[in-house]
Image (tube, grey):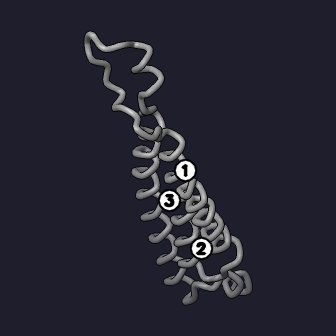
């Protein structure tokens, strides 16, 4: 239960950084924290206390296997999400650098005032 609370707190911190902060790097960090919160939540949803790996062994009781096996789908989704998130993070940092080169500032309000 504490991991759900941690995921909720991380989600709140990420959402705060994304919506309230004006500095573009802080917005990027807020989005990354938000992504990690969702990944933590997905892993926690698939976790079963005292669960067994989702590998069926010959001769084992099928009913006990099904009721006690950990769901591998959220883990696979999180692995995919981590890879996509890494590419997205690199793209956001590259765009942020280009914006800084173009406008000389990373403040979102200052960029809306500039024309050109």
> Is residue 116 visible in the rendered structure shown here?
no
Q: Secondary structure at mark 1?
A: helix
- Corner quadrant of residue 52: top left
Give whichever of discs 1 and 3 has the lower sequence position. Answer: 3
Could you tell me which quadrant the C terminus lies in?
bottom right
Residue at numbered disc 2: 27
* Viewer-side residue, 7 vs 94: 7
Q: Which label sits on residue 3?
A: none
Residue 105 locus on image (x, y percent): 57, 88
Q: What residue is drawn where x is 46% and y is 71%?
A: 93
Q: Which label sits on residue 36?
A: 3
> Is residue 20 visible in the rendered structure shown here?
yes
Q: What residue is drawn where x is 31% and y is 19%?
A: 56
Residue 50 locus on image (x, y percent): 40, 38
- Crowdedness near tag 3: few (<14), some (14–19) or many (≥20) residues, C-alpha within 10 Å: many
Residue 35 higher or lower than 25, as above or below: above
Residue at numbered disc 1: 41
């Amino acid at each position: 239960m504490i991991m759900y609370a941690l995921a909720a707190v991380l989600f709140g911190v990420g959402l705060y950084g994304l919506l309230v902060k004006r500095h573009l790097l802080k917005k990027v960090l807020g989005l990354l924290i938000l992504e990690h919160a969702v990944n933590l939540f997905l892993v926690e949803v698939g976790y079963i206390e005292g669960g067994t790996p989702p590998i069926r062994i010959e001769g084992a009781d099928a009913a006990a296997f099904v009721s006690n096996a950990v769901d591998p789908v959220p883990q696979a989704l999180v692995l995919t999400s981590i890879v996509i998130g890494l590419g997205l993070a690199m793209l956001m940092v590259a765009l942020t650098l280009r914006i800084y080169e173009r406008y000389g500032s990373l403040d979102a309000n200052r960029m809306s005032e500039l024309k050109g």
